[in-house]
Structures are given as C-alpha cells and as structure tokens.
Amino acid sequence: MDSDSLPLVQAAVQVDDLVVFTNALGQATLLCEGASVLKVFAEGHRSFLLDPFTCNGGTWTVTLTPLEIAIGEVVVEEALETNGVLSATTMSAKDIEAVPSSTGIPDLLTSLKTTASVGSNVEGQKGIVSRGGNYDQASIRADGFPLMNSTHLFGLLSMFPNSVVERVEFYANGKPIDCGATLGSVIEVSYNERFSSEKRHSGQFLSSVIASEIQVERSDKRSFFQFGGRRSNLEAVQGLIDKTINTNSSSDISAVYGFDDLSFKGSYLWGKHKIGTLFLASRDRVKYDLEFARSGRASRNQTNWSNALAGLTWKWFAGNGWNVEGRLGWNDYASELTRSRSEPILLNGQNAGMLESNASFMSHIETRQATLQAEINLERVHSSFGVEWRSLWAHPRFQETTGDEGSIEAKDASAGSRVNSGALFAEMDIKLSPALDGQIGVRLASWQLDKGREGAWLPKGSLTWRLAEGHLLSFHSALSTQALHLLTLNDFGLVPELWVASSGARPVERSWQTGLRWQQSSGQNSTTVDVYLRGMSELLAFKPGVTFDQDIESLLAQDVVAEGLGAVYGLEISKTHRWNDVKLDIAYTHGRSSRQFDDLNGGRPFPFTFDIRHDATTSVQWNLNERWEVTLMHVFSTGRWLNISEESVSFAMPNPSASSSVVWTSYPVADRRNSYQLGHISRWDCSVSRTQITASGIWKAQCGVYNLTNRINPYAAIWSENDKGDPVIEEIGLIPLLPNVSFKYAWN
C-alpha cells in the first residue's frame, strides 16, 4: 500500500527471478523459501528492497513512499516484466561480476559462455554460437538496437564493459516478438539508467593486464548521462604471449592483439515522456604470423573489425498500464582479413625460390531500423504490438592472387546489395489460471528482393505450468526469418567471413524451433533441463575448391550452393547449488547440428562446423569472508569440424619432370565434407580477489590466471612437417596462459 494506506494495484513483487503483480486489493502471493532478495516496484513510488529476505510463510505489509515526480526508475526499468514467462537467463551487472573471470574483467560474454545454451568451443570466433547456428544467427541488441558483431579478442570479451551494463537477458527458448528478424537466440543488453532525487556523480576505474577502462555518470531527477571507454593493455605483455604460445620448436608464431571501445548514453524525462540516445563504437586489430624453420614456409595473417551504433529512443508512459516506445537506429559493421602465404618451389630436390599467394576478404554491413511499439499491462494480460521497418545493405569484397605481387587490396567488384523489409507484430501474455501462463504472438514480415516482394506469417507460442511448489514446465514453439547470410570457408588458417544479403537467387533464411524446459528451484538452488529441436532452410555454403580470383556475382553463381537445410537437436542441463559460502554452477550441453545440400557431399547430411557433441562448464565460487573470494572454473568442449578434404598443398619431393612448375598433390584425408574434427578444448581458470569498502569508495584487487595449464586449445589447422619432413596437419591455438592482476576503484 502507499503512505495513505491505499492498496497499490499492479505493483510488481519480485523474489529472485519470480515476478507477480498485486491484485485490486494490493495483494500478491509468492511461493518461495529460504534466504532471498525481495523487491517491490510501483509506478510513481520509490522502490522497496529487502536483502536478505527470509521467505518462511509469513505475511508482509509493504508501504511505498510516493516519488516527487510521476516517472521514476520503477517505470523505466521494470515495465517489461510479464506474468512469470521469463527468458532463459537474466543477469544483472552484479551477477556478471560474480561469474569467475580470471582475465580480471567481468564480462557478459564470459558469463553467457558458462550457460548451457551458449557454446564454449568458440575461442577464436567473433560472436555468440547457440544451438547449432553460426554467430550471424544470434542477435545482440543494445537497448533494443541490433548489432552485427560485438566482440573483442576473438570472442574472449564483448564490447560492453560491465560497468556500463545494468542487466543482460538471454532468450534461447522464446524471444520477444520484436526480435523476429534473426533465426536464433537473442541477447538483450540494457545500459545503465539511474535517476536520482539529487544531483549525483559516480563512476569507476579498472585496470588489468588485458585492458583499462573507465565509466562515469551524472544523474538527477530528470536526466542521466553515462560515458564508458576501454583500451587494451596487451602490448605490455607481448613478450609473455610470444613465449607461451610457441610450444613447437619447428614453428615460430607471432601474435599481436589490440582493441578499444567507447560508449555514451543519455536520457531525459519530460513529463510522462522519456527521450534517450545511445552511441557505441569499437575496434579490433589482430596480427598472427607463422614461420616454419625446416621448409621456409610462412603464413602471415592480419584481421581487423570495427563496429559503430547510434540510436534514438522515445517512450511515453501514458498511464493505466499503457506504454508507447519508438526507436530509430543505425549500425555499421566492417571486417577485414588479409592472408599471405609463402611456399617453397622444389626443383630436383633444390629450393628454386618461393611461391607467394595472397588473399584479402572484406565485408561491410549497414543496417537502419525504425520501430514503433505499444504495451498494455493489465491484471491478467500483458500485450505488445507494433510496426517495424528495416533496411539492410551488405557489401562483400575479396581478392586472391598467386605470384610475387605482394600484399593486395580487396577488389570492389560490386556496389553491394540491399534488402528493405517491414513487419507488423503482436504478442500477448495471459495468466490462464494460478498454475498456468500462456503466450501467443504473430509477426507478419515482408521484404523487397530483386524478384519482387515476398512475405511470411511467423507465429509463436508458449505454455508454462506450475506443477508443484518450485517446479515449472514450459513448452515453446516459434518460426523466424533472417535476410542476411554468413559464408565461411571453414578450412585452414584464420576463418574469412563473407556476409551476403538475400536476393531472388538466395532466398531469406527460415527457421523453426520447439522444445520443453523443466525448472526446479528451492531457495538459492536450482536445476534446469532443456530439450529442443530446430530446423532451418534456404541456407548457403561454398562449393569445394572455391577460389576468390573472381568478382562477387561470378562467385555467388558458380561457387555457392543455395537451398540448404539444417537440423539441430539437443539437451541442456544447468544446476546451481550453494553450501553456505560456496556456490557451484554446472552446465552441460549435448547438441547435434547437421547441414544438407543436394550439390554437396553427395546429397548426404554432414556435420555443421559448430556441431557440439559435448560442452561442459563447471565453476566454483568461495566467499571466504566479506573481503576475500576464490573462484575456479573448468571448460571442456569437443572441437569444431573443418572441411579440408579438397585442400591441395606443395609437396616437398623432387620431380625432374615438373620443370620449373610447382608440384601439387592432395593430402590423403577423408573425402566427406567437414570430416576433420579439431581436438577438444580443456581449460582451467582461477582467481583470488579482495574487496575493501572505505569512506571514499570501493576498492577491489584480483589476481588470476586464464588457461592455467597453458594448453594451446585448437582454433584452426595448418599444413606443417614432422621431424622427417613429411606433411602433417598441425592444430594451432590463439590464447595461451595469461596471468592477470587487476585493480578496480568505484566511487559514488
């Protein structure tokens, strides 16, 4: 009730991840037990927080104090809660920081990779890999604006410093209806937005071996501004990286990493309206060279990628459960990979010189988006409906030569291609009974291709049963489409990426997913089991022996096959258990993903690159006391699948009949597509941290080790030689043992 003892209707009452709303009498009933955190939110009132809250069957009366302004933090941050139909994973910035991170930098990507729905065997991949799709099929949105890619250091970190993030929601089973433009999972990243009754300045600074970052914010009753920036420090430990990554005396590896990012967010309250802006920018620079002493072969690789986003939001809190929101967004993503290889030319057993081959791959993608969406919150029904417009422009470029031409630039062979699309969508969450919640939605999507306009109805639905105290069972099913294709060569060395927009010859990708989820929770302990089945169509893939010495239209017509099918099924198990000050988290995934094309592999199905047979993460967090904390984490995963059956290499043997020509031969490997599997990944991380609270702020120091055993987990395969000079396949990794010391200071 409020301070005048009047009941508050539709106030949100939250215990841990369970949210219910009060009825006409201001009452709500929760099923819970043990020590928890109680939060109560109501429009126009100050939030109520009780931590810890002992839920023991008693009756509580909570009185909320009115705010001086009608719009407060409760309306901005909590209006999207529904009738208990929750995303698969919801993490606050505090939750992310609690996940073991021996890099010294708490990060949402590190945290998500400890969950069962996200693959751990993607060290070296730039994005989230979830449930049998490539990283183009997992959409990451910042405050509702989609990003093409958002990673640093080959997926080790994201471009979202934890200090600027309020919470992260990961949707693997049922994503929001306004996220239907991507096939797979959705990660919603919400930036900080904290209004205060008085002017307030706060921030924090963190520095580690990996990077240094700073975050500052200013807030008052009506405005909020935040700035965040980060830059890598890896140049300072370059010698250590070179020493630990070179474990084979026959080869010399030089790896240089660098990255930086910045962000700005501003919000202003004007009556019942809120206006906000968001700007993000990031950049990565990686150089990875290999030299072989025996043969003189060399491989030089350099890859860079950058990302920029600008967004404008308007939100109207109309009252009586009504909210209206509009978003205008722009995102620009560019990636580049240049490769240069030197191969010895052997004539009569003598070295007659070196053959140089060069390749360059570039992709440039620009998206524009406009969305107008309304929400209605009633006692038993939560509804959302709106309209969306999106414009996608993709411009792939590449070039490949053989000879002594030196480094080359990607050929600008076309003006790129554009897809304009629109959608109408509506979704409704209904509390059917005290033990049953339902959700139903539909998205009418249409897109303009070179052969005309096409469209599709995309329904979705779910049911959630409360079987008994602490037990939930959910069923979900949904259809999705995606107008962007990602093509990867998936053979030797660093992986090039070519992003291609849909057209009449390359139809829009389609996907269907359904599954069951069972969750049991008791206090702070929980167990979750997910089973799912997913199908995909209209996929693309490279043909065997593809070459990049042609223009884009010729390559797409001659060396790319379309109308591919994909199938994924899997089991995911997660468990969290606490013993006093010790927390144990276990996640295990068994997922099988395959692809089938009429013109590939004899029309037979073959494993997808990220077919994850076994993926397990175990982490232990031990709070010794209020100041000291110890964490230990182990990651195990089966390796990716590579397609190397069609590769040709220069064979080190004399052949007088070959004159001055290079002698080429095929290496004897299996002839099935994606028939070579990289070795498994096994990594141990550990850290020790100490927190000190003083009158001036909070100090935290951490010592940790990433990849404690210095096991160079395989990322790619290359042609190498054994001690006899015979050709062999050698697996290479990217990130060795990285000891880390970090310091953090936060002030308020």
Image (cartoon, rainbow, N blue to C red):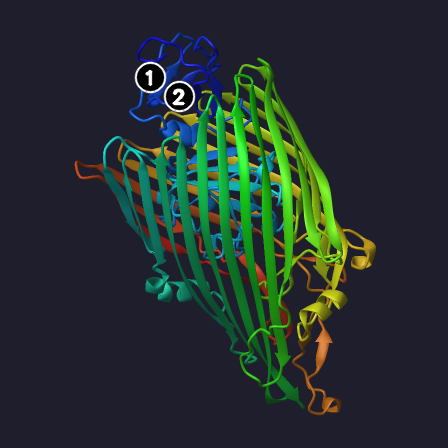
User: Quick one: SS at disc 2?
Assistant: loop
Of all residues shown, which one is farthest toward the front? 271
Front-most of residues 620 and 354: 354
Identify the residue under disc 2: 42
Give left or right: position of 710 versus 592. left
Q: The C terminus lies in which quarter of the figure?
A: top left
When the figure is inspected, residue 614 is found, relative to residue 559, above or below; the finding is above
Q: Marks 1 and 2: in contact by CB < 8 Å? A: yes
Give left or right: position of 572 versus 154. right
Identify the residue under disc 1: 64
Residue 102 place in picture, x, y as percent? 38, 47
Mark 2 closeness class: few <14, some 14–19, many ≥20 residues within 10 Å: many
| Total numbered labels | 2
Front-most of residues 529 and 618: 529
User: Quick one: SS at disc 1?
Assistant: loop
Name the residue: 71% across, 59% down. 541
Q: Amino acid at mark 2?
A: Ala
Q: Amino acid at mark 1?
A: Leu
Give the Cα distance between marks 2 and 1. 8 Å
Mark 1 closeness class: few <14, some 14–19, many ≥20 residues within 10 Å: some
Q: The N terminus lies in which quarter of the figure?
A: top left
Residue 117 place in picture, x, y as percent? 57, 39
Residue 349 place in picture, x, y as percent? 65, 88
Residue 221 place in picture, x, y as percent? 29, 33
Q: Earlier in the sequence, mark 2 or mark 1?
A: 2
Can I make out residue 692 in this image? yes
Name the residue: 40% across, 30% down. 272
Can I make out residue 700 in this image? no
